[in-house]
Amino acid sequence: MLKVDKIKAHYEGIPALHEVTLEVHPGELVAMVGANGAGKSTALKAIVGAVSPVSGSIVFNGKDITREQTAKIVRLGVVYVPESRRIFGPLTVEENLLLGAFTSDSEEEVGEHLNHVYGLFPRLKERFRQKGETLSGGEQQMLAIGRGLMIRPKLLMLDEPSLGLMPKLVTELFKTISLLKEEGYTILLVEQNVREALEIADRGYILQTGRTIHTGSGKELLESDTVRKAFLGL
């Protein structure tokens, strides 16, 4: 579904990616892990067109999207849920969700997608008239993911979804991400909780200083010396 081949990119004028390579196949949950500053978020932004690669290629479902506009990439089915939620605080829960359905012209389809999101996140349905800024951190993360699901994306990219959440909510979040995979969503996950991410991932990539340095199944990476020493303190 997605093939990123040796992309190089700058972020705010600073070289951030140096030949990052990765693949995501339909139905997979792929985790991308690495230390802060490794280039994980920049890689997601490059895929969705928010950062323009200076070399390399990004192909999605057979179409070269390396330098395509973000709006067109989203219409192809690629959705990026950014770090720090970035919901619209003054708007209600439901207004935030409906903004995520901007690519759909069918009211019936939008209604179906809204009901699907409310089924995944019952708390959002309970608070559908509540302003986004009044939600807890965990609820805001649910809202950010729910907004991303409103177009039923072919590829859902999650950037540090557990950031700032209490441990109990982190566990709940990873259960939800696993459920999304079971429902058939293809997911590319950037996550600071390395163990939790790799435990649910089919495959993973380790980034270091803007380069892909190691890849394997989630289990293989968890058992690798690179991950055990660098991230798990073992």
Image (tube, rainbow, N blue to C red):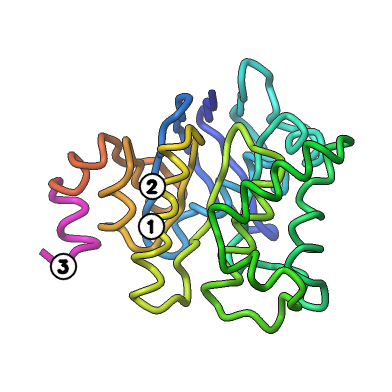
Q: Position of residue 164 (x, y in %)?
A: 47, 77
Q: Position of residue 114 (x, y in %)?
A: 71, 50
Q: Nearer the viewer, residue 91 or 155?
A: 91
Residue visible at 45% across and 75% down?
Answer: 165
In contact (CB < 8 Å): disc 3 and disc 2: no
Q: Residues within 10 Å of mark 3 (few under 14, many from 20)?
A: few
The residue where tag 2 is placed is: 178
The residue type indicated by label 2 comes to: Ser
**Secondary structure of the residue carrying numbered label 3:** loop
Residue visible at 16% across and 60% down?
Answer: 229
Q: Nearer the viewer, residue 229 or 176?
A: 176
The residue where tag 3 is placed is: 233
Work out whether mark 3 precedes mark 1 in sequence or the reverse, and give the earlier one. 1
In contact (CB < 8 Å): disc 2 and disc 1: yes
Q: Quadrant of residue 191?
A: bottom left
Specify the label residue 89 is tagged with.
none
**Secondary structure of the residue carrying numbered label 1:** helix
Figure quadrant of the N terminus: top right
Q: Quadrant of residue 141?
A: bottom right
The residue where tag 1 is placed is: 174
**Secondary structure of the residue carrying numbered label 2:** helix
Residue visible at 69% across and 60% down?
Answer: 12
Which range of residues does the magenta coloring cover?
Answer: 224-234
The residue type indicated by label 1 comes to: Phe
Structural distance between the alpha carbons of marks 2 and 1: 6 Å
Structural distance between the alpha carbons of marks 3 and 2: 25 Å
The residue type indicated by label 3 comes to: Gly
Q: How many marks?
A: 3
Q: Residues within 10 Å of mark 1 (few under 14, many from 20)?
A: some
Residue visible at 29% across and 57% down?
Answer: 196
